Image: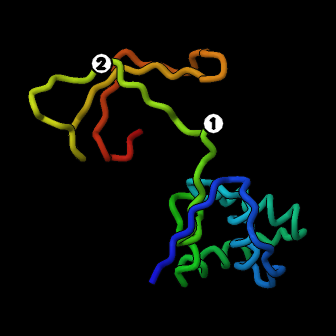
Amino acid sequence: TLRTTTRIRGQRRPAMPAPKTVLDKIIAAIRALEEPDGSSRIMIGKYLKSQFDFENAAALKKAFKAGVDKGKLTQKGQSFSIPGLTFEAPPEEKVQIEEIKSGPSDGAAAVKGSTVTMKYIGTLQSHGSKFDSASKFTFTLGGGEV
């Protein structure tokens, strides 16, 4: 049975015992970093160096592999997470979507694998400055292109 826990970043958590193995240190780093999409290998390494004075790249690589093989870690690209533990981004870090104009109402909804075209403008909520935009952006929905 997999138990899922979701916590908002910065929320207090119970004290954990001092990690003994490299894998335990990696797990402690992931818990401390609280990244909603998983913690990068680089950030975990920096955390281990700053908190545990640990810099053995070969042992770290071996522990990442063992953690994934044993099911204690989940890997997505170069990021790692703990199965069943998720972190929710604080509201100020979440993307807000405002639909200004929807597509044709012919009943054909876009599904995974559909090619869709959109126009967008990305602005910062704090002061409205534009950071990105596209007048015509085409991609395959669910294809990992965006």
Residue 127: x %, y % from top left: 65, 17
Tell me the SS state at disc 2: loop
Which residue type does callout 2 highlight?
Lys
Residue 79: x %, y % from top left: 59, 59
Image quarter of residue 18: bottom right
**Colouring convention used in this rendered image of the protein:** rainbow
Q: Are marks 2 and 1 in contact (CB under 8 Å)?
A: no
Q: Residue at x 80, y 72 (%)?
A: 56
Pointer 2: what residue? 101
Residue 126: x %, y % from top left: 66, 22
Residue 24, numbered circle: none
Q: Residue at x 31, y 46 (%)?
A: 142
Q: Estimate how packed mark 1 is, as few (under 14), some (14 to 19) or many (20 or more) residues with alpha carbons within 10 Å.
A: few
Task: Judge by depth and name the residue closer to the eye, 23 or 97.
Answer: 97
For marks 2 and 1, the one nearer the N-term is: 1
Task: Judge by depth and name the residue closer to the eye, 71 or 87.
Answer: 87
Side of 77 relative to 108 (left or right): right
Which residue type does callout 1 highlight?
Glu
Image quarter of residue 97: top left
Side of 5 relative to 10 (left or right): left
Residue 106: x %, y % from top left: 9, 27
Pointer 1: what residue? 92
Q: How many marks?
A: 2
